[in-house]
Structures are given as C-alpha cells and as structure tokens.
Image (cartoon, rainbow, N blue to C red):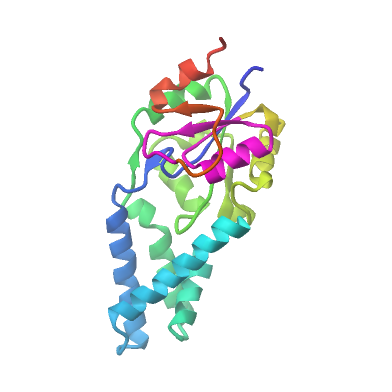
Amino acid sequence: MPVLALTIDFWNTMVVAHVNGERRRTERFAHLVRTVRRHRPDLEEPAIQAALQRAIDRFDASWRHRHVTPTTPEIVAGIWRELDLQVPEDDHAGTVRIFEEGLLNAPPALVDGLAETLAWAAGRYRLAIISDTMFSPGRVIRQWLDRHGLLPYFDAFVFSDETGFSKPDARAFEQAAAALSLSPTDLVHIGDLRRTDVRGARGVGARAVLFTGVHQDDDGPEPDTVLPRWQDLPALLRPA
C-alpha cells in the first residue's frame, strides 16, 4: 500500500525535551513563587513545590487513564486551589503565559536530521502533527515551528489542548486523517511512545513507527517499524 501521509508526534520525536528542560522548570517555578508570595508571603517554597507537583500528578493521571490533557489555565487554577489562594485574573493570566511560553524562551533542541527529512517528505506526502500537550499549547508549538521554518511543511495539526482528547484516543488520528481528506488507514504515524503513539495508530489501522532517536520506550505494544534516525526515513518508506 502506498504511503499517502505522515503524522508526527512533537515531544522527543521532533524535539529533544530535556534540552533546556531544567531551565523551563526553574523559570516557571520562580515565577510561581513570586506570584504566590504577593498574596501569601508566609508560604515556603516546599509547600509551593508540593502544590505544583500535585497538579502535575493530576495531569499525568488524566493523560494516562482518561486520555485528556488538562490545559495550562486548568493546571494553574489547580495550583491556586491547592494553596487556597484567590488570585487576581491578571496574576493568573501572567502565570499561565510564563508556563505556556517556556517553549519559546528556553527552547528544546531540534532532533538531528529532522529539518532536512521534513523538507524531503513535504514534497512527497501530506504531513500532520498529532501532539499531546501539557504546558506548551498548540498555539505556542506553532510559533516554535514557525521560528524554525517548519510550519509550512504541515497540512494539519491535532493538539490535545485544542481537541479535548489525547493519544491513544482514536479521534486524534481520525481528526488528522479527516483534515488531510484521507482514511486513518492511509496514515503512517511516527512517535516515541508505545502507550500513546503506537497503540493509538494501530488502533485505527494506521502504520505505527516508533522513533527511538531520543530515548528507548519499552512500555506498550510493538510498532510496525522502528526509526532510529530521521535520516533513515526515506529508506524506510521506499517500496520494497
């Protein structure tokens, strides 16, 4: 069956998440501490850190078990509830912005070979991104892609903060296919997580390619194919 379209995960498939990851975490937490202490100067950093961690844990549970990713405004609102704070809208919006735009201010690294391979693929296939989002919403990821000259390569985007569901929910793949005027079975999906990318793609009859160029994931179903480097994609897609 000929390849008609590629759908691609973002984190640890297109970008290396750990690059500048500590800087993003540090800047978000520092802003959070400053904001909290404007309203509760008595709160110590460990209590604020614990509230942040509980919010992250709730996100993770929802992502893993409900296939829904709470948005950054929802995550931040949960932190205020944990701390029993009534935060003015300006402070809430400012905190959300700092959390969301960390991707731009402390950017991850582009995975080696990605830009050249996307340029090659864009002339041959329809391309879409299917990405589960946490602090970095679809609007910010689009800005990051635009800064790197990659945005024009893509014909469609499915971001979980915009759709209300996340991989492996079949709707993520069905929505991408519909935006490309294709069937889900026409897709080749490339991602780094077996639990979300491989399971979701195989669940709709798409071809599942596990990208292992950033890290190895052994938790979940077997992919159809493994892609160790972006430079290997042309050979992987070439008809036998």
In terms of depth relative to the viewer, which is nearer, 214 or 137? 214
Q: Residue at x 36, y 57 (%)?
A: 102
In terms of depth relative to the viewer, which is nearer, 31 or 168? 168
Is residue 37 one of those drawn in magenta? no
Instruction: Classify the position of the C terminus by image quarter.
Output: top right
Q: Residue at x 42, y 38 (%)?
A: 14
Is residue 152 visible to the viewer in this orientation of the structure? yes
Is residue 202 one of those drawn in magenta? yes
Farthest residue to the top: give it: 240
Instruction: Classify the position of the N terminus by image quarter.
Output: top right
**Residue 124 sits above or below residue 17 on the image:** above
**Residue 156 sits above or below residue 18 on the image:** above
**Residue 50 sits above or below residue 127 on the image:** below
Give the magenta part as a residue range.
188-217
Q: Residue at x 68, y 42 (%)?
A: 175
Percent coordinates x, y for residue 96 in the rendering = 44, 67
Q: Is residue 238 left or right of residue 230?
A: right
Percent coordinates x, y for residue 65 in the rendering = 59, 58
Q: Residue at x 55, y 45 (%)?
A: 196
**Residue 61 sits above or below residue 168 on the image:** below
Q: Is residue 174 left or right of residue 35?
A: right
Is residue 71 visible to the viewer in this orientation of the structure? no
**Total numbered labels placed on residues in the image:** 0
Percent coordinates x, y for residue 135 in the rendering = 45, 59
Percent coordinates x, y for residue 10 in the rendering = 47, 42
Quadrant housing residue 180: top right
